[in-house]
Image: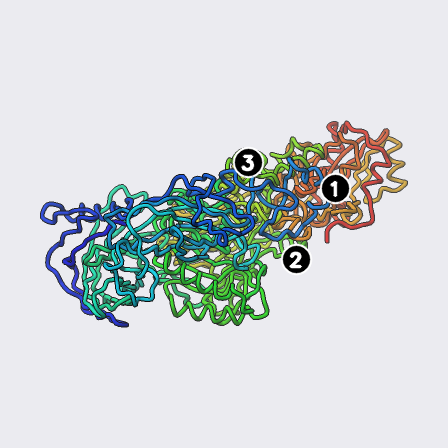
């Protein structure tokens, strides 16, 4: 940053009434009656010639431009791998390193490191270790063809010490200035030498590494020799020096091997320096820290800061701090009318460090706008000392509070609609350091109706905060230690490191209004963790009330928390299997978590909801142009092709994607319809490529669509305003009424006045079967707002048909739900088809005589696999099978042709939809590997991509002179009592009674018998 002004005569435009003083500072506000000049080292504005708007525009431009007091160090560097960690002992800082590399950058991205092998020293736990021993992975363990299935694979890997070195030239005009080395993001620990002098070390994973290299000049011109601070006594002569940086990306401190700060599961364990690398010069008297404490209710703010003084000027002196602040335009602002404010006040400062606090009382700063997701107005403030030293911060007036169990931002109720970012950036490995890329990511998240990203066990760089401030988006930040892969409160180095890292995060990013929530980390472990976290939360609640604090994402729920993040209120959990609501209970849209919320006194954010998987998108593979490659996808593609289904990959993706989307819809709506709930955080809007490959996103790791749901479709049920319908069921008969209670979750910018509710029931051909408009009413900000009821008799409606219940708030929002209407009475069944659940002698005799058989096997009688058995359920795979011990279900729904004549009387999509629950929840998957390869099932079951076996739910074939349809679910009289099963039986029998029933593939009796086994499918 260029210095704003080297003078002390900054005028004030607004007269405050008082200031507060702490420590040795005694700030007193001074009024001025006219504009002041700005210093020539940054820019020159002649007050008499330039209007106020141009002056502030110049400040804004200067704030974004490269600083004149900065010396960029990007470019060619020398380097050397220190495999034996001998460089310090051998004095490598005093030697000329032999190899060349580009910085900023990483080793692996530049092809430096070791080939991946079975002995690669990964950082990251591997739950399913079958890759190391299983025969099916043998070819992927061979040198030259190593492919791992548990995360994205770097082309090169190196874990250890690396030395980076270059010559630097200290400018002569930096005489008497302090020189700082700025490394925006390093991975991980750095140590720095100038020539043969050791400067220091830094082990932050979240914030820049800054080093005081010394003061330019001769010893006699510097501060007294009795100063103990190293940078006061360090001297740095102008001219050429050797700068050496040692970077160690091993587990320097045990923050947990699965932490996304360090793990190979996500960004990869890279070694290098990214972002800005530069030398900075500042005067010896400078503002070392500047924190803005907003008061949104009072439309004002206070300032806290630290002035560092290395000048030899005696114990006390009065200096003037000048401030210039005004609105900062967002990225989409074509133009704006700035209103900069100018203030100044003196501070009595001592030697070394002086803390000061300055406060403006309520009412003195009229006209300031508040910051939130709907109106992201924020401000740029430049503080200057008389010697030209400046400090620039961006801030917004934003309060967050928790009256009861919901959040308020600027006193308005807010619902957190979040997703995770687990540091997944396949092209670079490391997070983007440019604002533009973060703008793109946040815009994608907003287009899907979200308003928050939770950074799971890591913290993004400055660019991410800047983009979020501009676009009106919220962040939850964390330090490290995920998934109990380390323990807390046991006196290990990680205990102090978390405090230190949190302090650093607050210093560098604490002014950003987007920084809304903070947890110490994810899912902590250790017998002393709760006590440790209670102290942590209490400490930082008091230190920084600009945001809300909680112990850990996931747990524990301790009294000190200002909000809880907990996995309890969600559809499916680890270990839930087939016993959870989505798999064990018929579909409905009434369930909420009101009892759970009512038992708590702070907001609850549902932790990592979703985790619903989709089939790998093999068309995505060419996107991986960086050093991280999807070798896992290549393994899965090989497996699918080896089992004869390579041509079905795209269809598997789309069908499983549709199932995934409806699972997410019910997850999100369950949270939205819960009175008093604080919000949810998805895992994840985009895929998580680690932990065995968790394809849980509707977007790929690049935040790109996969082809089965758009942002417009997703945001119908995930948004600031979402109409909701409470339906006790989704399958009806024509003698029933469709009954629904209509409500809305509205967390928009303001209440909706005179809102008109419109509903309609639409058939698959687009015809409106029924509709109505409810009286207009005002809708407050909040959820569980009842809007009316629907009581629709279904008699006379065309059936069987899938209908869509569409509910909309005119000119605001719309949502919809699929329902099915079936006839109460069906035509008589054909007499010449044997319907049976037994493949017994009578069944075989019927086939030998040329008869037709509908064999509907109970799911628990369908033969399973001895190894990795199929666990068939309605929902998609949860997280993935490799990391959950093959938790049920292990399938990803069904795939069929809706136009197949066997399904002509059974309305269906090509994928699983809610009506299939009635069949699938009691079904078994038919093993097509036991039948002739030419058997093409009427309905397929999509197997887990790790096993990728051919499975069916309904199939047909010729058996001697006879013909047969086999189902993996029972459709005999008792089993077909409910309308969905009854309709499926009717549709299959109608097909078997038609001329179209002409199976082409011959199936032997022995092959049919092999489909039946004693081991049940499912759990």
Q: Note whether residue 739 is visible.
A: no
Q: Residues within 10 Å of mark 1 (few under 14, many from 20)?
A: few
Considering depth in this image, is 867 or 504 the residue closer to the camera? Answer: 504
In the picture of the structure, the residue carrying the numbered disc 3 is 620
The local secondary structure at tag 2 comes to loop
The percent position of residue 608, horizontal first and vertical second, equals 54, 55
Question: Crowdedness of circle 2 by 10 Å Cα count: few (<14), some, many (20+)?
Answer: some
Cα gap from disc 2 to disc 3, whole angstroms = 31 Å
Where is mark 2, residue-wise? 575
Q: Quadrant of the C terminus?
A: bottom right
The mark nearer the N terminus, 1 or 3, is 1
Q: Where does residue 935 sit, x and y in percent of width and height? A: 75, 32
* Tag of residue 135: 1
Residue at (45, 67) in percent of width and height: 562
Q: Is residue 1013 visible?
A: yes
Residue shown at 65% from the left, 30% from the top:
647
Percent coordinates x, y for residue 78 in the rendering: 44, 42
Residue drawn at 33 percent across, 44 percent down: 72
Spatial CA span between label 2 and label 1: 28 Å
Q: Nearer the viewer, mark 1 or mark 3?
A: 1
Q: Is residue 1001 left or right of residue 599?
A: right
Element at label 3 = helix
Mark with earlier residue (2, 3): 2
Towards the viewer: 698 or 945:
945
Looking at the rendered image, the disc whose residue lies closer to the viewer, 2 or 1, is 1
Residue 93 in the image: above or below residue 642? below
Q: Are the residues at dot 2 and dot 3 in contact (C-beta closer than 8 Å)?
A: no
Local SS, label 1: helix
Q: Quadrant of residue 75?
A: top left
């Amino acid at each position: 940053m260029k210095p704003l002004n080297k003078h002390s005569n900054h005028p004030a435009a607004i007269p405050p009434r008082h200031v507060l003083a702490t420590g040795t500072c005694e700030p007193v506000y001074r009024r001025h009656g006219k504009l002041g000049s700005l210093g020539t080292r940054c820019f020159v504005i002649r007050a008499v010639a330039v209007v106020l708007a141009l002056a502030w525009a110049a400040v804004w431009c200067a704030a974004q431009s490269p600083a004149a007091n900065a010396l960029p160090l990007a470019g060619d560097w020398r380097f050397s791998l220190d495999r034996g960690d001998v460089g310090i002992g051998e004095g490598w800082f005093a030697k000329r390193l032999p190899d060349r590399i580009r910085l900023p950058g990483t080793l692996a991205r530049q092809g430096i490191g070791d080939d991946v092998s079975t002995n690669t020293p990964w950082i990251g736990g591997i739950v399913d270790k079958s890759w190391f021993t299983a025969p099916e992975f043998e070819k992927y363990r061979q040198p030259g063809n190593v492919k791992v299935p548990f995360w994205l694979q770097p082309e090169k890997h190196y874990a250890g010490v690396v030395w980076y070195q270059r010559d630097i030239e200290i400018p002569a005009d930096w005489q008497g200035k302090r020189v700082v080395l700025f490394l925006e993001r390093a991975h991980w620990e750095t140590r720095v030498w100038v020539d043969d002098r050791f400067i220091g070390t830094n082990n932050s994973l979240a914030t820049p590494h800054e080093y005081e290299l010394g003061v330019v000049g001769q010893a006699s011109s510097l501060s007294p020799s009795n100063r103990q601070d190293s940078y006061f006594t360090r001297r740095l002569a102008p001219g050429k020096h050797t700068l050496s940086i040692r970077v160690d990306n091993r587990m320097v401190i045990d923050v947990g091997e699965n932490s996304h700060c360090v793990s190979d599961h996500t960004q990869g364990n890279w070694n290098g320096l990214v972002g800005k690398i530069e030398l900075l010069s500042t005067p010896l008297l400078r503002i070392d820290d500047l924190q803005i404490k907003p008061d949104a209710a009072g439309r004002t703010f206070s300032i806290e800061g630290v002035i560092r003084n290395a000048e030899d000027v005696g114990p006390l002196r009065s200096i003037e701090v000048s401030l210039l602040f005004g609105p900062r335009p967002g990225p989409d602002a074509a133009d704006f009318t700035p209103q900069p404010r100018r203030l100044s006040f003196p501070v009595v400062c001592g030697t070394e460090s002086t803390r000061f606090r300055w406060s403006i009382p309520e009412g003195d700063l009229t006209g300031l706008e508040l910051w939130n997701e709907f109106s992201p107005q924020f401000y740029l403030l430049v503080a200057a000392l008389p010697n030209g030293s400046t400090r620039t911060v961006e801030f917004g007036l934003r309060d967050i509070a928790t009256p009861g169990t919901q959040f308020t931002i600027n006193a308005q109720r807010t619902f957190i609609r979040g997703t995770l970012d687990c540091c997944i950036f396949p092209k670079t490995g490391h997070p983007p350091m440019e604002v533009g890329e973060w703008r793109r990511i946040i815009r994608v998240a907003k287009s899907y109706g979200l308003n928050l990203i939770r950074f799971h066990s890591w913290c993004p760089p400055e660019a991410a905060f800047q983009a979020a401030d501009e676009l009106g988006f919220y962040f939850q930040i964390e330090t490290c230690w995920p998934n109990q892969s380390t323990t807390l409160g046991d006196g290990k180095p990680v205990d102090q490191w978390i405090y230190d890292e949190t302090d650093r995060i607050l210093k560098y990013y604490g002014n950003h209004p987007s920084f809304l929530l903070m947890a110490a980390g994810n899912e902590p472990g250790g017998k002393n963790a709760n006590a440790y976290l209670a102290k942590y939360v209490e400490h930082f609640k008091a230190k920084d009330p600009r945001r809300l604090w909680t112990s850990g994402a996931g747990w524990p729920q301790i009294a000190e928390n200002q909000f809880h993040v907990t996995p309890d209120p969600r559809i499916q959990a680890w270990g839930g299997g087939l016993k959870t609501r989505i798999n064990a209970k018929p579909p409905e849209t009434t369930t909420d978590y009101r009892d759970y919320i009512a038992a708590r006194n702070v907001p609850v954010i549902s932790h990592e909801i979703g985790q619903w998987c989709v089939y790998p998108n093999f068309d995505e593979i060419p996107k991986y142009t960086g050093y991280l490659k999807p070798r896992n996808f290549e393994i899965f593609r090989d497996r699918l092709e080896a089992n004869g289904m390579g041509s079905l990959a795209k269809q598997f993706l789309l069908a499983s994607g549709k199932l995934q989307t409806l699972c997410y819809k019910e997850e999100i709506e369950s949270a939205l319809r819960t009175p008093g709930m604080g919000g949810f955080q998805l895992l994840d809007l985009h895929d998580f490529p680690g932990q065995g490959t968790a394809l849980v996103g509707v977007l790929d790791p690049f935040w790109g669509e996969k082809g089965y749901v758009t942002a417009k479709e997703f945001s119908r049920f995930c948004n600031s305003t979402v109409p909701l319908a409470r339906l006790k069921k989704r399958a009806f008969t024509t003698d029933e009424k469709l009954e629904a209670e209509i409500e809305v979750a509205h967390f928009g910018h303001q209440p909706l006045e005179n809102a008109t509710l419109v509903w309609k029931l639409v058939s698959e051909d687009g015809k409106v079967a029924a509709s109505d408009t409810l009286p207009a009413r005002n809708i407050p900000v909040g959820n569980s707002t009842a809007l009316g009821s629907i009581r629709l008799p279904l008699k006379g409606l065309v059936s069987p048909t899938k209908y869509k219940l569409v509910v909309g708030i005119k000119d605001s929002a719309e949502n919809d739900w699929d329902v099915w209407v079936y006839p109460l009475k069906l035509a008589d069944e054909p007499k010449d088809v044997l319907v049976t659940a037994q493949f017994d002698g009578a069944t075989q005799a019927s086939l030998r005589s040329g008869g037709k058989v509908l064999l509907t096997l109970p799911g628990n009688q369908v033969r399973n696999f001895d190894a990795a058995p199929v666990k068939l359920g309605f929902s998609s795979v949860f997280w993935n099978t490799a990391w959950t011990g093959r938790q049920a279900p292990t399938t990803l729904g069904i795939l069929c042709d809706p136009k197949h004549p066997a399904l002509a009387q059974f309305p269906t999509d090509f994928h699983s939809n809610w009506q299939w629950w009635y069949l699938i929840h009691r079904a078994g998957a038919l093993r097509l590997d036991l039948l002739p390869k030419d058997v093409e099932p009427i309905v397929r079951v999509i197997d887990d991509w790790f096993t990728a076996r051919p499975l069916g739910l309904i199939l047909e074939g010729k058996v001697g002179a006879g013909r047969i349809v086999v189902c993996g679910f029972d459709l005999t009289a008792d089993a077909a009592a409910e309308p969905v099963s009854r309709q499926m039986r009717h549709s299959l029998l109608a097909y078997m009674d038609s001329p179209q029933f002409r199976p082409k593939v011959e199936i032997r009796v022995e092959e049919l018998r092999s489909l039946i086994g004693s081991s049940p499918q499912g759990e």
